[in-house]
Amino acid sequence: MGEREEEDCFPTQLIDGKGEFNVEGLDTFVNKTKLSDSGLSYAVVAIMGPQSSGKSTLLNHLFKTSFREMDAFAGRSQTTKGIWMAKCVGIEPFTLVMDLEGTDGRERGEDDTTFEKQSALFALAVADIVLINMWCHDIGREQAANKPLLKTVFQVMLRLFSPRKTTLLFVIRDKTKTPMELLEPVLREDIQKIWDLVRKPEAHKNTPLSEFFNVAELRQKFFHSISPGGLAGDRRGVVPASGFSFSSQEIWKVIKENRDLDLPAHKVMVATVRCEEIANEKLHHLATDETWLELQKAAEDGLVPGFGRKLTSILEKYLSEYDAEAIYFDEGVRKEKRLQLKSKALDFVYTAYATMLGHLRSNALESFKIRLEQSLNQGKGFANAVRDSQHFCLLVFDKGCEDAAVTQATWNASKVREKLCRDIDSHASSAQTARLSELTANYEKRLTQALSEPVESLLEAGGKETWPSIRTLLKRETEAAVTDFLDVVTGFELDHATIDAMVQNLKDYSRSVVEKKAREEAAKILIRMKDRFSTVFSHDKDSMPRVWTGKEDIRAITKDARAEALSLLSVMAAIRLDERPDKIESTLFSSLMDGTVSDSSSHNRSLGASTDPLASSSWEKVPPKDVLLSPVQCKSLWRQFKSETEYTVTQAISAQEAHKRNNNWLPPAWAIVLMFVLGFNELMMLLKNPLYLLGLFVAFLLCKALWVQLDVPREFHHGALAGVLSITSKFLPTVMNLLRKLAEEAQGKTTQGVPEYSASQSYRHQSPSHSISESVQSNISSLADDDAEYSSPALVQRRNTSNVRETEISEM
């Protein structure tokens, strides 16, 4: 054969003479001839026959192979050792031919028939067509060379469980003149005899030879041998071409181990191995697929539109490739391995799908939060806003799940949807709690603003209507707040119990505001009492500051001021929001103002017992929680109050006495009578002489002017000695000032009288005494009117201060 033909048929030794399987050589043969691409469209032909019967030569001429042939000139000897294989050239479909070592060879001897049986069994298990090379002259002979060969073939066939149907093609070599029509019955009879003599298992005792073999003639063509009507058209149990290598190895392994060859089980085993190999290969390709890797990365970064469609396409690609490559293997095994491949592939890509669901859930939850906030800002009721936002977000999530769904999978997004619903409910609950808390805080702030300052003002007033006014204020503001609160909270669609509890909390809060403010004011009660006392004591009924002139009844004023302070104490002794009557005020006034406490205490000390109503830590008919100042505390506060206000009373008494002293300048009545009696003569002398009377009058005017200018009462207000010293130091300047004023006044009148003749004439006709008296009186009056111009700085300051105080009091 030429080199071209050898390259095309690729002759390869499959099993050597020692029975070793050439795995590497078979793999090389499969790759070079592309046998795996043939699927079931391939045929295997094997040839058996005696040694040196021309088997290799027949195959080379018949299939254009290049098996080694015997050199007839070198003598008869063993040419083919083991089993060789090659590709048939120019025959469709793909046909693989195997050349078996010849039987009955002298190299192995008569007793060494093991390899003959093993190779025959291998050929029958693998080949679709088995050529049996026979000499024509051996037909009909009892001891012909083909008898042991046929016996061997039939024996090994029975070792196959449910054997595949194999075509036996008898090749008659060196045909004689005997017609073929006569040779065929003899050949069939000889074959039937050999079949009948072979020991068969119980299951095949009555099995006819035709069940296993079809007899054909050499002249039939090998083209399309596996098509219906071809040489191997009714073959069964064909192994796909891609599994031929592994199947051949396993068959030979079983034969070598001298075990019975179960071809159906072998077929399943081959299908299992090959389908698993194909599935693993597709799974590996899926893991390294660029499209899948890009899709996986995109899914990690965020939502991928059309994720399910893209992933379905990728999975379908590899499942289709698996189906195409495993289509010729056992159907049950193929489907099982396909399911395993599908399961593994889905497990492999599930992470990306779960990531997509995670993105969908996160986006839906975020969308819910945004829509809920927008709806609430637009004024929609909370419950309606939650329902609408949840419905919308779940629809978006469901559509996203449909888009991410994979056709090959039965994945259910219900658990993720349930988690989304739980997250939505949790956020809605948190938002509701926050909104209700904010709402409650706003109304509490509103109540605080509406109650704190008014309550504080009412408590500062501290009258009989204080607590009734506070109760009215509390009721009005609380009811207004509760009404508005119920209008707003209706949108939350809460149950009645929850709403009632919230309303009650709001009412309790408004009450707590009043109670807190009352306790704060109770802590400042002593200051308030002193302020109240000072206000009543230092101001009259017209709210004008009192001037202690000596006419005021300080004892009565002090009692009234203390009564007002004690009234304030009784108001602040307890919280009175429940309209329960109490005896706090009467107890305090009877015990503190009437002096019964001290009297009864001193009286009962001798009896060894105390009936002091203030010797207690609680008030009668007042709950302990409402007590602001206990009786004992009130008693202690009253003592402290009296001690701290005694100084004010003492100062008032001192001011009154000082005023009396400063305003009492007349001598006693007896002194006046005595002076009149003793000075009667002098008085009569003055009455008889008008000039003396005029002099006394002028002296009186001068003294009056000096009295006003020197402000004698004020100077003596600080004591006699200080007054004398001050007047002495001011006396001479004041006299000089008076004289200057008189001189200026006289000069002014002289200047006016010069041009007026009638005036001067009349002046000259007037009496001198009358003129002098009028001039002095005029000047003294002028000084008296202008006494403010000559005032000491201290006097001006005192008057200014007095004016300022009067202004402040009038503003109050």
Image (tube, rainbow, N blue to C red):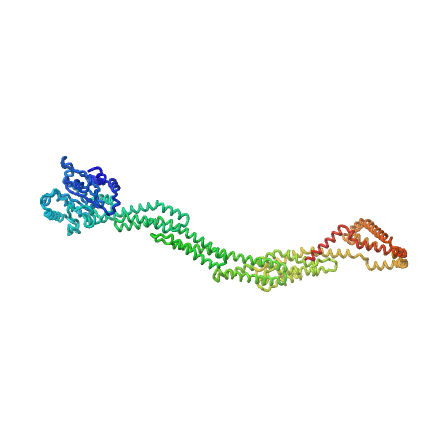
Residue 769 at x, y percent in the picture: 89, 56
Q: Residue furthest top?
A: 74
Image check: 221 left or right of 427? left
- Give the quadrant of the C terminus: bottom right
Q: Nearer the viewer, residue 314 or 795?
A: 314
Image check: 356 left or right of 546? left
Q: Is residue 663 visible?
A: yes
Would you place residue 425 above or below residue 18 in this image?
Answer: below
Count of marks placed on residues: 0
Q: Is residue 629 visible?
A: no
Image check: 597 left or right of 3? right
Image check: 580 left or right of 391? right
Residue 631 at x, y percent in the picture: 61, 59
Residue 167 at x, y percent in the picture: 17, 47
Picture quadrant of residue 414: bottom left
Q: Nearer the viewer, residue 294 or 198?
A: 294
- Give the quadrant of the N terminus: top left
Residue 193 at x, y percent in the picture: 12, 48
